Image (spheres, grey):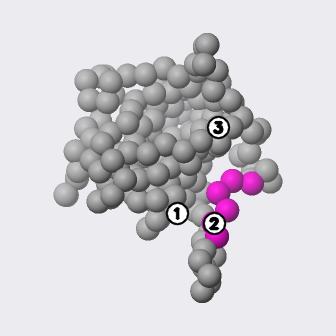
């Protein structure tokens, strides 16, 4: 696993009325602070990526559908420099992915319907000076291809 990345298995509590799933708590050992909460979606087969943050930690959980979340460690001083992680997340694998600054990340919807992720980053979005640095999804120096692996 990339240094600083944490994958927290989420517990789903279901009964005859429905279900409940806690995503992030202030007593989680990786919790730093609250910036905002937002949701993002992707349609089937769509890739959203790559980007990283200089200050912000992301805390992402897929709450509908399935996504392949991919991380790339671009930190030259990191013990996991150059490492790639694929995390399959969503209704069939409820996890929270904690992503540190300078780790590129993106995701692809791998379910038949739109997938929805909830993110609780440590910083609020700054519209005047966004802490977001992007690369194209497919034409870049990251050694990763978004195609499905039928291996």
* Disc 3 to disc 2, C-alpha distance: 18 Å
Q: Nearer the viewer, mark 2 or mark 1?
A: 2
Report crowding for label 3: few under 14, some 14 to 19, many 20 or more residues within 10 A (C-alpha).
many
Residue 21 tag number: 2
Where is 25 relative to 81, above or below?
below
* Picture coordinates of residue 58, whole percent (x, y): 60, 38
User: Which residue is rendered at x = 56% and y = 48% of the image?
Assistant: 118
Q: In the rendered structure, which segment of residues is drawn in magenta?
A: 20-25
Please, which residue is most extreme toward the front here? 17
Q: Please tell me whether mark 2 sits on a helix, a strand or a loop.
A: strand
Q: Residue furthest top?
A: 128
Callout 1 crowding tier (Cα within 10 Å): few <14, some 14–19, many ≥20:
many
Q: Which residue is mark 1?
A: 94
At label 2, counting other C-alpha atoms closer than 10 Å, the crowd grade (few under 14, some 14-19, many 20 or more) is few
Confirm whether residue 76 shows in the render.
no
Q: Please say if 3 is above or below 64.
A: above
Do labels 2 and 1 touch, CB within 8 Å?
yes
Between 44 and 32, the one lying in front of the other is 44
Give the spatial CA distance, label 2 vs label 1. 9 Å
User: Is 74 contained in the magenta span?
Assistant: no
Q: Earlier in the sequence, mark 2 or mark 1?
A: 2
Residue behind mark 3: 121
- Judging depth in this view, the residue of 2 and 9 nearest the camera is 9
Q: Which quadrant is the C terminus positioned in?
A: bottom left
Residue 59 % position (x, y): 61, 44
- What residue appears at the point 80 percent right and 54 percent down from the top-left corner? 27
In x, y percent, where is residue 31? 74, 45
Residue 68 visible here: yes
Type of secondary structure dominating the magenta stretch: loop
SS assignment at label 1: loop
- N-terminal of the pair, mark 3 or mark 2, is 2
């Amino acid at each position: 696993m990339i240094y600083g990345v944490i994958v927290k298995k989420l517990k789903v509590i279901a009964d005859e009325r429905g279900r409940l799933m806690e995503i992030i708590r202030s007593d989680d050992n990786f919790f730093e602070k609250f910036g905002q909460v937002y949701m993002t979606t992707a349609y089937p087969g769509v890739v959203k990526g790559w980007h990283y943050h200089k200050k912000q930690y992301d805390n992402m959980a897929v709450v509908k559908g399935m996504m392949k979340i991919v991380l790339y460690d671009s930190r030259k001083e990191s013990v996991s420099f150059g490492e790639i992680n694929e995390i399959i997340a969503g209704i069939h694998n409820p996890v929270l992915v904690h992503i540190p600054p300078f780790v590129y990340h993106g995701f692809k919807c791998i379910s038949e319907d739109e997938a929805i992720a909830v993110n609780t980053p440590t910083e609020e979005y700054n519209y005047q000076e966004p802490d977001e640095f992007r690369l194209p999804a497919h034409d870049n120096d990251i050694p990763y291809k978004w195609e499905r692996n039928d291996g």
